[in-house]
């Protein structure tokens, strides 16, 4: 039923015309607190609340809070106070939880602060310690999720009693704010760590880019004989994926089997993605074939996995199989199949899939789809069509799309187009060193050493330095990281001797490597 407006509602009878006298301490609900769009639902909830029935009021407030209607919950809370009903701990926690669950709402933090003020105003000296802990923990959670980890820390420090949930909430808040040091400090001081505690730390390390530290925490969790659940394992798989740590990922897969979690679809999807990104799409396919139940994410994972590993025909075949089994592809599905067409040079097929996305499934192309289309044309040497595609985008192209075209300009030796693209890229990211280096390499490949010198001078003038290249490899469950120009690895001498030997062997077989001098090399 369509929502009524204030003019469509029946008039509220005046208290003087009522035959029944209102009970003591009750007052009419102020109409200024209610929005026209939600007044019928809110009024019906409040009408069932008796004057002193705190349970009914709390239920009405919690109902609005769970639905994310913070304004209506705040109005009901104000009406409750106006009616002379004192909120209990459950009422306040329900409101704080709503603020924490919907932190992006503009009213979330102000409402949370107001609840905090009400609690200080109505503080009971005889409150049970359990009530104080529950409320204080909800307050910490609200401030942390609303982006005020500093205030959450103040509340947490002043808590007279802290339980495991309180510690976990504060640690998660610091991790969310990027303050890993404080989070680990409190974690180390916990008197008792449970499964959630370890999961919060591991997941926080992953989200803050501390991938090896996350794996170390997982090892420590195992040494403490605490079994991980699927949430913990998802975070560990994410760390293995980002590191390319295949051996660690294989161990985690075995752990999943031993814990009886093989049928967990989310874990299977994550493992497929991990194997694909580690270059073992054959393992990913084996796991995909053994899945008892598949979701759209499962299909997308294997399609994208095949595409990024160069198994383009397999990616296209699985995309078609997905449709034949009744799954409707989404934007990720089309990103995968377009990537496959791009890598295989299948321009015609790629354009057909692009039209299928737009015309049959009515999916508006996103920037990643335009990027695939630009890459499709660029790899085929159709640079002007790629540039035309960029010009037809309804939004400004990002650096990924333009960098794809710039890389193609280097391959096909189109210096003039490279200069046009670089000018736009430098406007978007004037301090990105890779754009300067790529154009410098294009000049060098074309023998335009004046252009190389100009790029080098410009980089020095604006203070841009070339970021050293970095790579890593996993050997025996240990991650070895290498930085260009850095000989700090303990086996550096042996590595360079092997490289010299390989270079000598290549020359014997007639290979003459072309070395392009970087923009900042002396």
Image (cartoon, rainbow, N blue to C red):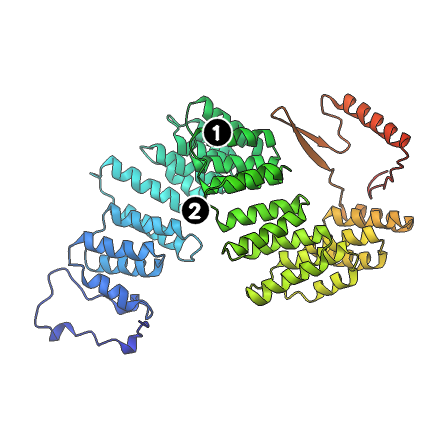
The location of residue 85, given as percent across then percent down, is 19, 55
- Between residue 131 and residue 280, name the one nearer to us: 280
Image quadrant in which the C terminus is located: top right
Could you say which disc has been placed on residue 446 in the image?
Answer: none
- Would residue 502 be found to the left or right of residue 37 on screen? right
- Would residue 436 be found to the left or right of residue 137 on screen? right
Q: Is residue 389 above or below residue 375?
A: below
Tell me which residue sits at (76%, 54%) in the image: 379
The location of residue 99, given as percent across then percent down, is 37, 51
**SS of the residue under disc 2:** helix
- Between residue 374 and residue 157, name the one nearer to us: 374
Could you say which disc has been placed on residue 145 in the image?
Answer: 2
**SS of the residue under disc 1:** helix
Callout 2 environment at 10 Å: few (<14), some (14 to 19), or many (20+)? Answer: many
Q: Earlier in the sequence, mark 2 or mark 1?
A: 2
Image quadrant in which the N terminus is located: bottom left
Tell me which residue sits at (45%, 45%) in the image: 293
Tell me which residue sits at (39%, 54%) in the image: 108
Residue 353 visible from this viewpoint: yes
Single out the mark in the foreground, 2 or 1. 1
Tell me which residue sits at (84%, 59%) in the image: 416
Q: Is residue 56 above or below residue 34?
A: above
Could you say which disc has been placed on residue 255 in the image?
Answer: 1
Residue 274 visible from this viewpoint: no
- Would residue 419 be found to the left or right of residue 146 on screen? right
- Would residue 57 be found to the left or right of residue 116 on screen? left
The location of residue 509, given as percent across then percent down, is 89, 32
User: Which residue sits furthest bottom?
Assistant: 7
Q: Is residue 342 above or below residue 395?
A: above
The location of residue 66, given as percent across then percent down, is 33, 54
Task: Tell me where residue 285 sits by quadrant.
Answer: top right
Residues at marks 2 and 1 touching, judged by CB atoms closer than 8 Å: no
């Amino acid at each position: 039923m369509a929502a009524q407006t204030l003019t469509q509602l029946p008039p509220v009878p005046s208290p003087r015309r009522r035959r029944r006298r209102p009970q003591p301490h009750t007052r009419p609900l102020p109409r200024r607190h209610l929005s026209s769009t939600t007044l019928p639902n809110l009024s019906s909830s409040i009408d069932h609340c008796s004057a002193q029935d705190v349970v009914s009021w709390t239920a009405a407030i919690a109902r609005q809070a769970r639905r994310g209607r913070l304004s209506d919950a705040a109005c009901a809370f104000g009406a409750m106070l106006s009616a002379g009903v004192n909120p209990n701990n459950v009422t306040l926690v329900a409101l704080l939880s709503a603020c924490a669950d919907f932190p992006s709402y503009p009213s979330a933090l102000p409402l949370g602060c107001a609840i905090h003020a009400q609690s200080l105003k109505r503080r009971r000296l005889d409150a049970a310690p359990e009530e104080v802990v529950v409320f204080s923990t909800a307050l910490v959670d609200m401030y942390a999720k609303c982006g005020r980890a500093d205030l959450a820390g103040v509340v947490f420090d002043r808590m007279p009693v802290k339980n495991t949930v309180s510690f976990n909430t504060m640690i998660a808040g610091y991790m969310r704010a990027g303050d890993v040091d404080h989070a680990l400090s409190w974690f180390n001081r916990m008197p008792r760590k449970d499964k959630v505690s370890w999961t919060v730390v591991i997941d926080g390390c992953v989200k803050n880019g501390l991938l090896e530290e996350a794996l170390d925490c997982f090892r420590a969790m195992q040494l403490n004989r605490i079994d991980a659940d699927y949430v913990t394992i998802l975070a560990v798989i994410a760390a293995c994926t980002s590191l390319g740590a295949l051996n660690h990922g294989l161990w985690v897969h075995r752990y999943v089997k031993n814990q009886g979690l093989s049928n967990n679809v989310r874990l299977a999807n994550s493992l497929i993605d991990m194997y694909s990104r580690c270059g073992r799409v054959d393992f990913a396919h084996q796991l995909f074939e053994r899945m008892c139940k598949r979701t759209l994410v499962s299909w997308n994972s294997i399609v994208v996995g095949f595409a990024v590993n160069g198994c383009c025909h397999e990616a296209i075949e699985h995309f078609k199989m997905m449709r034949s089994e009744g799954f409707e592809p989404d934007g990720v599905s089309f990103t995968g199949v377009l990537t496959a067409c791009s890598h295989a040079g299948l321009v015609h097929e790629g354009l057909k899939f692009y039209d299928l996305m737009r015309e049959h499934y009515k999916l508006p192309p996103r920037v990643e789809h335009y990027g695939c289309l630009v890459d499709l044309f660029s790899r085929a040497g159709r640079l002007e069509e790629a540039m035309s595609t960029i010009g037809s985008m309804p939004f400004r192209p990002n650096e990924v799309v333009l960098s794809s075209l710039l890389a193609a300009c280097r391959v096909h030796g189109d210096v003039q187009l490279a200069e046009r693209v670089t000018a736009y890229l430098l406007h978007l990211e004037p301090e990105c060193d890779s754009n300067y280096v790529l154009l410098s390499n294009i000049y060098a490949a074309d023998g335009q050493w004046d252009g190389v010198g100009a790029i080098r001078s410009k980089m020095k003038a604006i203070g841009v330095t070339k970021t050293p290249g970095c790579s890593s490899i996993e050997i025996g469950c240990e991650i070895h990281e290498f930085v260009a120009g850095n000989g700090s690895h303990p086996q550096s001498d042996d590595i360079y001797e092997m490289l010299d030997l390989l270079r000598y062997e290549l020359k014997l077989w007639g290979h003459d490597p072309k070395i392009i001098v970087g923009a900042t090399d002396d």
